[in-house]
Image: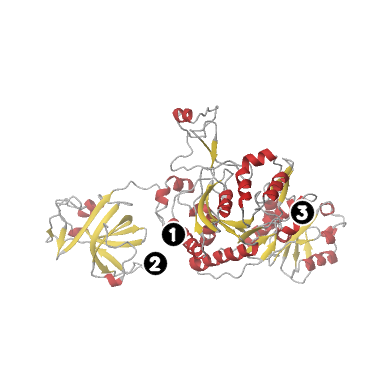
Amino acid sequence: MLRTHTCGELRIDNVGEEVILTGWVAKIRDLGPMIFIDLRDRYGITQIRVDVNNFYRNAGSEIIISEMEAKDKKAAFLSKIGREYVLKVSGIVEERSSKNNDIPTGAIEIVVNLSPKSELNASGYAIKNGVHKYIQVLNPSKLPPFLIEDETDGGDDLRMKYRYLDLRRNPVRRNLELRHRVMRETRNYLDGHYFIEVETPVLIKSTPEGARDFVVPSRMNPGEFYALPQSPQTFKQLLMVSGFDKYYQIVKCFRDEDLRADRQPEFTQIDCELSFVTQEDILHTFEGLIHHLFQKVKGINLPKMPRMTYADAMRLYGSDKPDTRFGMQFVELNNLVKNKGFKVFDDAELIVGINAEGAANYTRKQLDELTDFVKRPQIGATGLVYARVNEDGSVKSSVDKFYSPEDLAEWARAFNAKPGDLLLVLAGGKDKTRKALNELRLEMGSRLGLRDKDTFSALWVVDFPLLEWDEETGRYHAMHHPFTSPKPEDLELIDDRPSDIRANAYDMVINGVEVGGGSIRIHDRRLQEQMFRLLGFSNDEAKAQFGFLMEAFEYGAPPHGGIAFGFDRLCSIFGGSDSIRDYIAFPKNNSGRDVMIDAPSPISDTQLDELHIRMRNITAPQGK
């Protein structure tokens, strides 16, 4: 190694030792005759102290000061060093007179002062009392386009373009170190439970279900395409047929879909499958995994995870991934508010609200902001009704002329409201209103400080619908995927009431984020064929897409099930971030572009000819 120690490990016990450090210049401070350099590497920062007046001419090209005749040795020194230069420093560890308690190495510094009486060794390095002392520039650096510090002046676009510089910053480095710990502990837990990690193909067959595939043209098979896997679903089921009863893989997956904070076109899953198990076995095993990760990575012991049915989640929270760090459950008011002359309520399919405890002091301006919030197009409510519970217990609402004080007191009782609470009510179609109230609930949770990133509330959501009807295509779609098994007790509904069938499926939700989901799979060919028919597949289509899987089911497929966790999402939850990009070394931007390497990009006509692809007239993105 070029170094004897890292920039994060020297302590007071090392005083007097001769050491060699390597790293990047984080800061240079000019304090009269002394210059101080903060040298940084992945492990930390160590202060270097230089008395430039004691530097002299050295025949070795490695030494920064090489001009004995220089009248201003400080200027000569500073002209040969800059921020982000890569240095090799040899010197003596000394105790700092002014200690920095904010960093682990803050009690010491490295002194590299050279005396004119020093001698040169055969390599040209200065020696004093048998100790080598020098500063060597391993590589200079251009001035970075933004400050490489915890609090930087670089915007998202600039830092994405120079991501290799952004990765030098402590917060980004710590995020990737956390990701590494989560990955290591995941493997430790699964290895300890006899899982075997198996790699599955990346070039696979495109399927019509789920999100849009990324496709890859085949040069050797003109006109045919591979797809990049959205998940290893069919392969892990085939591994169960093969007898590998406990499989896992920390695997890259790809989905060509619109991006947001918790989505990237390529992402990582903890993908698992087990044979000869029930739903209860899977919930127990993987609740254990999450408990293990929280304990090992965060030092937190999570309580046992409660379970909530999909129906209750939608009724009480308007979401299949409820944030249960706080209450504010939905209260339906149809029986209390209809037929009172208020047309908005009288005509509504559903009137439902939440109790924002302690928010009765909200001003009219704040209430108008909430009204504007729910009327945003992406939320879609037509308006907001509110009622304050005053200190004397009386209730004052925005629709007082339609409701008597006795009516409003009934509202307060329905919400279990107390003086100082604020009731917020929406009305409209059932699904749309619940969705809008869910967004309002989360907004109020944030405004009232109820969504603490250091508080963790996890639960299982179970009993999802197996199918959902798509008006646009006029057919059913699988709520999870077409290999999910129905609840055994609901199989009798498959011909007459398919929309009422519950799936043998489950999601894990932490702080309102779906971090994992899975199901017990279909392992019987006849039932799988029946499922394909429900989803609108003809026999030929099902055979063309999934014939290999159905054939495998005829060779002794065991009962099996599994789960996949969004690894990037788990890391962002552990790190207290809303964006998974912060935990990916080289992420894409919101347009799916890698602005650092400028991808995607056009390819040459020669490559297109080899792939037998003829390009239509396509307008390149701006700036291309």
406 or 247, nearer to the observer: 247
478 or 397, nearer to the observer: 478
Snapshot quadrant of residue 291: bottom right
Residue at which label 2 appears: 102
Residue 583, percent across and down?
A: 49, 55
Q: Nearer the viewer, mark 1 or mark 2?
A: 1
Crowdedness of circle 3 by 10 Å Cα count: few (<14), some, many (20+)?
A: some
Q: For the N terminus, which image quadrant? A: bottom left
Q: Earlier in the sequence, mark 1 or mark 2?
A: 2
Find the distance from the CA under tag 3 to the CA under tag 1.
46 Å
Question: Disc 2 vs disc 3: Cβ atoms closer than 8 Å?
Answer: no
Asked if residue 425 can be seen in this view, the reply is no
Q: Secondary structure at mark 1?
A: helix
571 or 91, nearer to the observer: 571
Q: Earlier in the sequence, mark 3 or mark 1?
A: 1
Crowdedness of circle 2 by 10 Å Cα count: few (<14), some, many (20+)?
A: few
- Name the residue type under label 2: Asp
Residue 529, percent across and down?
A: 69, 46
Q: Is residue 235 left or right of residue 81?
A: right
Residue for point 63% across, 47% down: 550
Q: Earlier in the sequence, mark 2 or mark 3?
A: 2
Find the distance from the CA under tag 2 to the CA under tag 3.
60 Å
Question: Disc 1 vs disc 2: Cβ atoms closer than 8 Å?
Answer: no
Q: Nearer the viewer, mark 2 or mark 3?
A: 3
Residue at which label 1 appears: 177
- Name the residue type under label 1: Glu
- Name the residue type under label 3: Asp
Residue at which label 3 appears: 500
